[in-house]
Image (cartoon, helix red, strand yellow):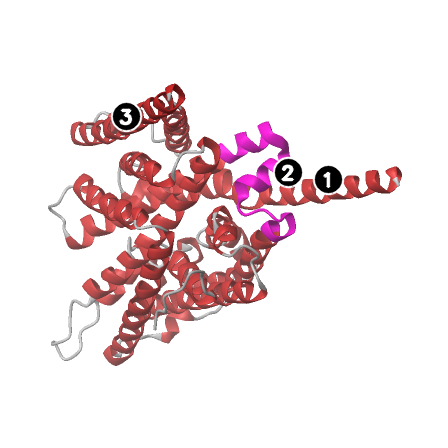
Amino acid sequence: MIRKMDGYSPLQIFIVIFLFLEGTAILINLAPDLGRDAWIATLFCTFIGMFLIWWFFFLLRNTNQRHIYAVLQQGLGKIGGSIVGVVYITYFIYICARDMRDFSELITNAVLPSIPLEWTTLCFTVTVIYVLRCGVQNFVNLFVLFGYVFAAIFVVFLVLVIADGELDFHNLLPIMGDGIGPMLPSTFTQVLEFPFGELIAFTAFAGMLYPNLSGKVMRASLLSVLAAGMVLTVTIIVELVTFGPSIRERAMFPLVSASRNISIGNFIERIEMIVIFAILLAAIVKVCIFAYAALQGVVWYTGKSYNSLIIPYVLLTAEISYYVSNNMSDHIMVGLSFVPIYIHIPLQFAVPAILLVFIKMRSRWRKRDDQTAV
Amino acid sequence: MKRTYFFILILVMVSALDILCLFHNEQWNFLVMYSQRKKLVAACLLILVATVYSIVLDWKDGRNSHTKGSE
């Protein structure tokens, strides 16, 4: 299935974006404030997410640059671009650390309760360092394999949930009982930024893998966001019909809880381990992509080789992941209150929008100058 | 020493962002968290390894460029 190739195929970016979006979003309680309407918000944000990936790639295509760090320098000048570029590296490392913490908390809470969080994180760190050191061509091919495994496990999970039969679709009713108004704030401050806005990480390297970001690549990316959004929506629906909105709101890892409830003939049980394995694959992809996005920035600013930078920056990510919060509930609280509004919105939407305006204005001024000179 | 300086810059910035997030969420006990022995030892070791690794690579780069220059 996986052909050896010199370049990268649209299938690869499809799977990488898909797993990136699933990453930790499938694990944690997405849009808990929205209760039974969480799936509608996710579905709605999927379409905005498709626009976002188009917009981010348009920024690269329109400027003929290969990554966002070069676009920043083109749009904001050398000093301004470098400052904002360093802020982006900081952002990618911080979000990478948060994702690493999500995964470590999952392992510590659900699988290995007697193993300290620090050890789990360290093991994950070593895996990430190894994957990144294999080089981009190899880890993208590895992620394609992860994609097939993830899809197979998801299908098995759905079949088992349906076979279990303990589904109450009344938990989804009334749909938008309080109208669309109360849904909007949580939709725009929670679901849109996480996970769809995080696609900004792809602007740090997508132009290098696919130099001209052709129509095929764009279509694959759009379809990938659509597929990932659909899978997230189905997952939330499964969580809701399995144990209702009130329990889902309180659950730390609702998907794991939903899979733990499955019992077919008192024989097929404890399938949460398979689900956790699938989440682990997606989490590795997400952490690697964020780390790779940050490393590309460091390579761009320092001019040092990529391989020599992997160990220090991934170790830094691990160190920050210890300190992002005291426990899982604080971690989720920070992720829902401060991070979306003060970190995600400026760096995912405001800066790219300002960049686009600056670049358009500069090109217009240049054209006007050329006409005046003629 | 460009690699090391840049690493320290990013370390300071990410730590500042982390503390800012904790402050905003009114987790005033972040110093208590920072001083938990197990976490502190693990974090210090990681940062020490990362910094020493960067310094050694920078020193090697410097030595190589010096050798090339003298040739």
Q: Quadrant of the C terminus of chain A?
A: top right
**Cα–Cα gap, marks 3 and 1:** 43 Å
Sort mark 1 into few (<14), some (14-19) or many (20+) by Cα contacts within 10 Å.
some
Q: In the figure, A62 relative to A237: above or below?
A: above
Q: Which mark is residue B56?
A: 3
The chain under label 2 reads A
Tell me which segment is drawn in magenta.
A59-86
Q: Secondary structure at mark 3?
A: helix
| Residue A267 location, quadrant | bottom left
Looking at the picture, how far across and down is residue B6, in whole percent? 41, 27
Q: Are marks 3 and 2 in contact (CB under 8 Å)?
A: no
Mark toward the viewer: 3 or 2? 3
Q: Is A173 part of what is drawn in magenta? A: no
Where's the N terminus of chain A, which quadrant?
bottom left
Q: Secondary structure at mark 1?
A: helix
**What is the C-alpha distance between the residues marked 3 and 2?**
36 Å
Marks 1/2 in contact by CB < 8 Å: the verdict is yes
Please name which of the two marks, 3 or 1, marks the residue nearer to the observer: 3
Which label is found at residue A75?
2
Q: What kind of secondary structure does the magenta stretch mostly adopt?
A: helix
Point out residue A65 in the picture as x, y percentages from the top left corner. Answer: 58, 46
The residue labelled by disc 1 is A362
- Pick the residue in front: A7 or A185: A7
Q: Is any part of residue A193 visible from this angle?
A: no
